[in-house]
Amino acid sequence: MLEEQQPANMRSFLVVWLGQLVSTIGSNMTSFAIEIWAWEITGKATTLTLVGFFSLLPSIIITPISGVIVDRFNRKFLMMVGDTVAVFCTIIILLLHLTNNLQIWHFYLTGAIVGTFNQFQSLAFESSVSLMIPQQHYTRASSLGFLSGYGSQIIAPALAGYLYTVIGFSGIWLIDICSFATAISSLFLVSIPQTPPKNNENIVNIWQDLGVGWRYIITHKSLLALLLVNLLFWLPHDIGNSLYTPMILSKTNNNTLVLGSLASAAGFGGVAGAIIVSIWGGFKRKINGVLLGMIGAGISKIVFGLGRTAWVWIPAQFCSSLNFPLNGSSDTAIWLAKVPSNVQGRVFAARSLLLQIASAVGYLIAGPLADRLFTPALQSGGVLGRMFGGLLGTGTGAGIALLYVICAVCMLLVGLLGFFVPVLWEQD
């Protein structure tokens, strides 16, 4: 049964947003604990990057049909299903740990399952935003999404770092279970509008409808150009981002305090950026926000990759995260404004599919590039040692840092070149 259309306001959005904030804090705490646990066992960057890859792989397969399902079925129900599946997978991991049967591949499998249903959950929420709030608040609502993500980074690493020694791995997973319960409960408190299907839409037509999102993007050249620019930006970003944890741990002799401090710095930067955008509302021409956010992130990450101490990493990480709410909220506002609500699920799914493929490729190649190419090449006496040793050093983690800097330079170039692509400026 369809939810009745309600007047657009921020109340329902804020209730769901608060539930997701609590859930995100719990999830980030477990992610922090998983990364430390996996690195201590294997000491390989590939191990950590494969967790991200397997989380994305199944959702890539399901993405084409997910957009059609989100446009045709109850979005509130789909969001609840996504959170419920995540709870069950968390419980399974907890039981495996308590019985001393937990292994790395269990994270690959559960990550794949959760990633699949998260695709429905996130797409359903994203497609509901334009129906829950007035258009003038699109950028602010998007910035609140970043506030939730980055805000959790302030709290989660500090909590996880402290509680890991007090209540252990199992205690952190119990907190995550409770956080998911909060997110599900918040959905019971609100009515999420649903776009009524057209009279000629039925289940049989789903298979004919799979290409609607992609055809819509192709026929709107400015959106296609925006998508291509995003692909070129997020591919190097995800390669570098997947190497962030092993780079810091290898350079600091597994100092989890430094890693947690950097995560908190990223959280503070993201929250500051989200608050600024939420109050300000962003550039009138949203494409300015997209490209300037890319440029700022690229410059900050170059400094971060070149740094060798926390005194450089912490401010660079803060400045990097400061840019992403501007970039992301501007990008989201463009898509929400230019795509009709009755096809947003399919269009956003097509967009999400390509971005996920880029991320999956990044996660898949990042580990082998770091472990087999850049790390040995930048060791003392390595091929790249003489060329970059003076800049990055030749110790543990130097090779990963070089790859990280190369990715950051690519991000910067994409943002700069975007100002010279005329079709991008047809967004407004």
Image (tube, rainbow, N blue to C red):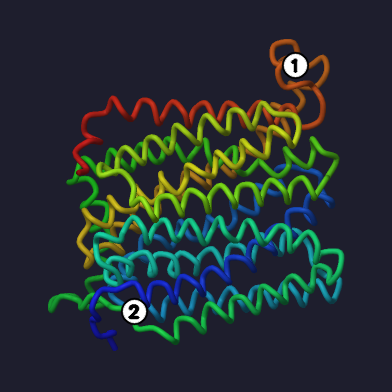
215 in relation to 296, above or below: below
Which residue is nearer to you in this view: 18 or 423?
18
Which residue is nearer to you in this view: 197 or 226?
226
Which residue is nearer to you in this view: 145 or 407?
145
- Residue that lies at the very extreme toward the front in this rendered image: 279
Helix, strand or loop at mark 1: helix
Quadrant of res 188: bottom left
Check the picture and name the quadrant holding the N terminus: bottom left
Q: Name the residue under label 1.
A: 389
Q: Which residue is drawn at 72% across and 27% down?
A: 399
Q: Which residue is drawn at 24% across and 49% down?
A: 217
Check the picture and name the quadrant holding the C terminus: top left
Q: Which of marks 2 and 1 is nearer the N terminus?
A: 2
- The percent position of residue 134, horizontal first and vertical second, equals 25, 66
Cα distance, mark 2 to mark 1?
56 Å
Helix, strand or loop at mark 2: loop
- The percent position of residue 396, horizontal first and vertical second, equals 81, 30
- Residue that lies at the very extreme toward the left in this rendered image: 199
> On the rendered structure, is 127 left or right of 41?
left
Disc 2 crowd rating (10 Å Cα; few below 14, some 14-19, many 20+) is: many
Q: Which residue is drawn at 75% across and 74% down?
A: 94
Which of the numbered marks, if any, corresponds to residue 192?
2
Q: Which residue is drawn at 52% across and 26% down?
A: 409
Q: Which amino acid does label 1 sit on?
A: Gly
